[in-house]
Amino acid sequence: MDRSKFKFKTEIRVRNYEVDWQGIVHNAVYLLYFETGRIEYFRALGLRIDLESIKHGNRMVLVRNEINYRAPAKFDDLLDVHTRISAIRNTSYVMEGLLLVHRSDKLIGENVAVHVWLDPTTDRPKTISDTFRRAVQQFEGDSVVIEWPTYLA
Amino acid sequence: MDRSKFKFKTEIRVRNYEVDWQGIVHNAVYLLYFETGRIEYFRALGLRIDLESIKHGNRMVLVRNEINYRAPAKFDDLLDVHTRISAIRNTSYVMEGLLLVHRSDKLIGENVAVHVWLDPTTDRPKTISDTFRRAVQQFEGDSVVIEWPTYLA
Amino acid sequence: MDRSKFKFKTEIRVRNYEVDWQGIVHNAVYLLYFETGRIEYFRALGLRIDLESIKHGNRMVLVRNEINYRAPAKFDDLLDVHTRISAIRNTSYVMEGLLLVHRSDKLIGENVAVHVWLDPTTDRPKTISDTFRRAVQQFEGDSVVIEWPTYLA
Amino acid sequence: MDRSKFKFKTEIRVRNYEVDWQGIVHNAVYLLYFETGRIEYFRALGLRIDLESIKHGNRMVLVRNEINYRAPAKFDDLLDVHTRISAIRNTSYVMEGLLLVHRSDKLIGENVAVHVWLDPTTDRPKTISDTFRRAVQQFEGDSVVIEWPTYLA
C-alpha cells in the first residue's frame, strides 16, 4: 500500500491483555485496531455510523476483510493506524488500513475492508447516499475512486 | 469454496460474551473460530503446533488472513467449522475454513489463512518438514496441492 | 462454598484464545465463564434476562463481583460451572458460582455476583417480581433465602 | 475507598470493541482496566512483574478479585485508573483500584485485588522480598500497612 495516499491517522497503544502466550498481539486483535481506525476516520469526517445512523435508514455491514501480517506488535507498542476510503461503488465502499510503529517505518500490518450499505428494514443492498460520497470526496480528494449514481452523471 | 473438499469438521457454540451491541458475533471473533478449527485440525492429525513444536525448531506464523462474511452468527448458534489445508509450498501452507450453521446449508463465513514456517533462532523462512507434508497428504489425499522439495523429486 | 447446595451445572471448554502468555486462562475470562453459567441457569428456569425482559420493565444490573482464584484453568480443560441463587432480597439477588474441572474435585474458582433490579425508565432500584421469586424458589427449594415483599406476608 | 490515599493514576480510553450489546463496557473489561492500572503502577515504581521477574524467582498470582460496579463506562469515555498497594503481609499483598471518569467525581468502579508470591519451582507461597517492600513503602509512605518479616524486627 502507498502510505502517501493516507490522509488520516490515529494512535493506539497495545494493552497488556491484548498480547498472547507468545508475548505478541494476537492475530484477531489487529482487526480491532483497524476497526478503531475506521471509527475515528468517520468521526473526523463527521459521519455517523452507529446506532443513530441505523435509525436514519443506513446500515453498513462488513462483508470482507483482508489482513497481511508483516511484523508482530508487542506489549506497550504505540502504533499509528492510517485509514482511508479507496473506492466507493454503487452500494459498497472499500477501506484500507496501514498499521505502523509510531513515527517509524516499521510496518506491522495492512488491511482491506469491504463494506456494503443495507436497508435496515429489508436487509438488501442500498445505494450509498450522496452525503456520504461528498464527505469522503471532500476529504480524500483524488485518492478515492468514486462511482456516482447515474442520475448524477 | 467447495465444501466437499473439507474432510475435517469441529463444532463451536457462540457464547454470550462474543456478541456485540448489535446482538451478533463481532467481526474479529470469526477469526477466533477459524483458529479453533485449525487447532483441532492439527490435533486430529497428530501434529504439534504449540510451544513444544517451537522447541523442536518449528515456528508457524500467520502471514495473511482473508474472511468473507456471508451472514451473521448469533448468540447460542451452534456452528460447524470445516477446516482443510489446500496447498503446501516450500516454506508456506494455505488453510481454508468454512463456517456454517450446524447441520444446515446456512453459510456464515469463509476464511483463507496463509502460514509460513520460520526457524525460531533466525526468524527466517524454513522448508516445511516432510513429516508435516506426509501427515497432511495422508489425511487430505487428492484435495491438497503439495510441492515437494526438489531433493525428493 | 458448599457444592451440595448447587442444583444447576453447565459445561464449558477452555478455548485457545482464552489463555494468556503464561498458558493459563486470564483472570478476567473466569468472569465470562461464571456469566455463561448464570445465563444458562436462567434459561433452564425459563426466565428471560435479555433485551426482551427490558421491554417488559425489568433490567438487572451487576453491582458486585467477588472471585477467588483457586487453581488455573488451562487450554482445552473441560470445566463444570455450578450456578445458584443463594438469596433474593427486596430489589437485589445474590448468585454464586463454582468452577471445577469436569468430573473431578479440582476447584478452579468461586464467584459471588450481586445484582439489582432497575426500572428501565428511571434507572432506580425496583422490587423484584413475584414471578422471579417463585421460579427461583421452586427450583432452589430450601437452599435459597427469599425475603418476600411485606404485602405477601 | 478514600481517594486521597491514592498516589498513582493512569488514563485509559474505552475502545469500541470493549462495549457490549447494551452500549456499555462489559463487566469483565473493568478487570482489564484495573490490571492495566497495576501494571503501570509497577512500572512507575521500577518493579518488574513480568516473565523476567519469574526467572529471578518471583511469581505473583492473583488469588482474589472484588469489584463494585458503581456506574457504567461508555464508548470513548476517558477514565482515570487510580492504583495503590494498601497492605503487604508475609507472602501476600493487597492492591486497590478506583475507576473514575477523567477529571470528574463520577465513580465507575472499585477493585480490591489480593496477590500471593509463589516460588516458581515449588508453586508454594514465598516471603515477599525486602526490595519489593522498600520500594512500595518509599512510594506509598504512611498509606500502606506493611508487616515486615521478623528477622528485620
Image: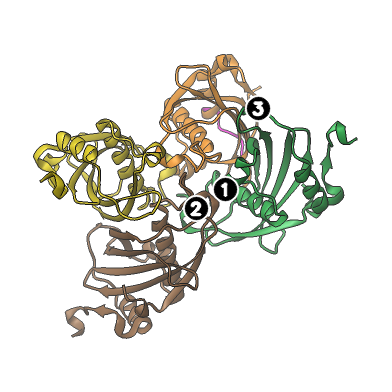
Chain colours: A brown, B yellow, C orange, D green
- Look at the magenta stretch and give its main secondary structure: loop
**What stretch of residues is rendered in magenta?**
C126-131
**Which residue is located at x 63 percent, y 60 percent?**
D11
Asked if the residue at tag 1 contacts the one at tag 2, i.e. Cβ–Cβ closer than 8 Å, the answer is yes
Q: Which mark is residue D18?
A: 2
- Helix, strand or loop at disc 1? helix
Asked if the residue at tag 3 contacts the one at tag 2, i.e. Cβ–Cβ closer than 8 Å, the answer is no
| Disc with the residue nearer the chain's start (2 vs 1) | 2
Q: Nearer the viewer, residue A115 or B65?
A: B65
Assign the C terminus of chain D to one quadrant of the image: top right
Hey, what amino acid is under mark 3? Arg
Hey, what amino acid is under mark 2? Glu
Q: Taking D82 as reference, is B81 left or right?
A: left
Instruction: Classify mark 3: residues with Cα within 10 Å, few (<14), some (14-19) or many (20+).
Output: few
Instruction: Classify mark 2: residues with Cα within 10 Å, few (<14), some (14-19) or many (20+).
Output: many
**Which residue is located at x 54 percent, y 47 percent?**
D29
List x then y, in percent, for residue C81.
49, 26
Alpha carbon separation for disc pair 1 and 3: 26 Å
Instruction: Classify mark 1: residues with Cα within 10 Å, few (<14), some (14-19) or many (20+).
Output: some
List x then y, in percent, for residue B28.
37, 52
- Helix, strand or loop at disc 3? loop
Residue denoted by label 1: D32
Hey, what amino acid is under mark 1? Leu
| Disc with the residue nearer the chain's start (2 vs 3) | 2
Residue A47 appears in the picture as rendered:
yes
Circle 1 marks a residue in which chain?
Answer: D
> Do marks 2 and 1 share a chain?
yes
Q: Nearer the viewer, residue C116 or B100?
A: B100
Residue denoted by label 3: D124
- Helix, strand or loop at disc 2? helix
Alpha carbon separation for disc pair 2 and 1: 10 Å
| Disc with the residue nearer the chain's start (1 vs 3) | 1
